[in-house]
Image: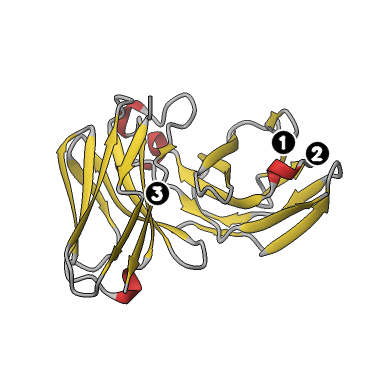
Amino acid sequence: DTAVSQTPKYLVTQMGNDKSIKCEQNLGHDTMYWYKQDSKKFLKIMFSYNNKELIINETVPNRFSPKSPDKAHLNLHINSLELGDSAVYFCASSQGGDRGPGDNYGYTFGSGTRLTVV
Amino acid sequence: AQTVTQSQPEMSVQEAETVTLSCTYDTSESNYYLFWYKQPPSRQMILVIRQEAYKQQNATENRFSVNFQKAAKSFSLKISDSQLGDTAMYFCAFMKDLAYSGAGSYQLTFGKGTKLSVIP
């Protein structure tokens, strides 16, 4: 069973389009995240949700909007895609919040979505 | 804010040899966690080893061990008996302990990574 699953794994789209990346975790974790890995492999947090509530919203263009319908899902919607949005986007989850990061410090990553904007 | 620095963008090691990857960090926190993650070409992020800052004993996981120097804010990873499958990007990461730092989430702050190549 896949613990954190992201779809799609690859996404090629034209500038100006709107696209979504979906993420689901079946670990019962309280907190979910989106990280962006740029072309130089640098990983940086974008958003963090704890029990459907936004906790962290780093300096990210407002074209990026996370949506958490329930604590097992955190989707990322991107409007008006730009060339600079090309990157790998990782979803992750952790036990997080008041209950601590968990025995293994909680983090489970999805396999990433490679977004290419042309 | 925390920063994590990996000063070696690329390294190589002969198969079966030992290699050490460096990591330093800057924080005003006294309680936190440190991690090494491996990212092979498959791009999956794999936890290699973790260290709780309050523990003086260095963590070990099979061929992987760390040298944690809290005062120096240094957290290096030693890979013994290197194998071809160890070829990957390695990321050092920092996480605040929210039990001491208050509300928020357990976000990871990553270094820029070290690309390790194991040569047959």
Q: Is residue B8 visible?
A: no
Residue that mark 2 sits on: B80
User: Mark 1 belongs to which amino acid?
Assistant: Phe
Distance (Cα) linking label 2 and label 3 = 29 Å
Residues at circles 2 and 1 in contact by the CB criterion of under 8 Å: yes
Single out the mark in the foreground, 3 or 1: 3
Q: Residue at x 44, y 65 (%)?
A: A38
Q: Specify the farthest residue to the left.
A: A69
* Same-subunit check for callouts 3 and 1: no
Q: Nearer the viewer, residue B70 or B50?
A: B50
Is residue A15 positioned above or below B120 on the image? Answer: below
Q: Is residue B99 visible?
A: yes
Is residue A88 positioned above or below A48 on the image? Answer: below
Q: How is the image coloured?
A: secondary structure
- The answer to which image quadrant residue A28 occupies is top left
* Image location of residue B9, percent across then percent down: 66, 64
Which element carries disc 3, helix, strand or loop? loop
**Dividing the image into 4 quarters, which one contains the N terminus of chain A?**
top left
Residue that mark 3 sits on: A112
* Same-subunit check for callouts 2 and 3: no
- The answer to which image quadrant residue A86 occupies is bottom left
- The answer to which image quadrant residue B112 occupies is bottom right
Which element carries disc 1, helix, strand or loop? strand
* Image location of residue A34, percent across then percent down: 32, 50
Give the left or right position of residue A49, taking residue B16 as reference.
left
* Image location of residue B67, percent across then percent down: 73, 42
**Dividing the image into 4 quarters, which one contains the C terminus of chain A?**
bottom left
Distance (Cα) linking label 2 and label 1 = 7 Å
Which element carries disc 2, helix, strand or loop? loop
Could you tell me which chain the residue with mark 1 belongs to?
Answer: B
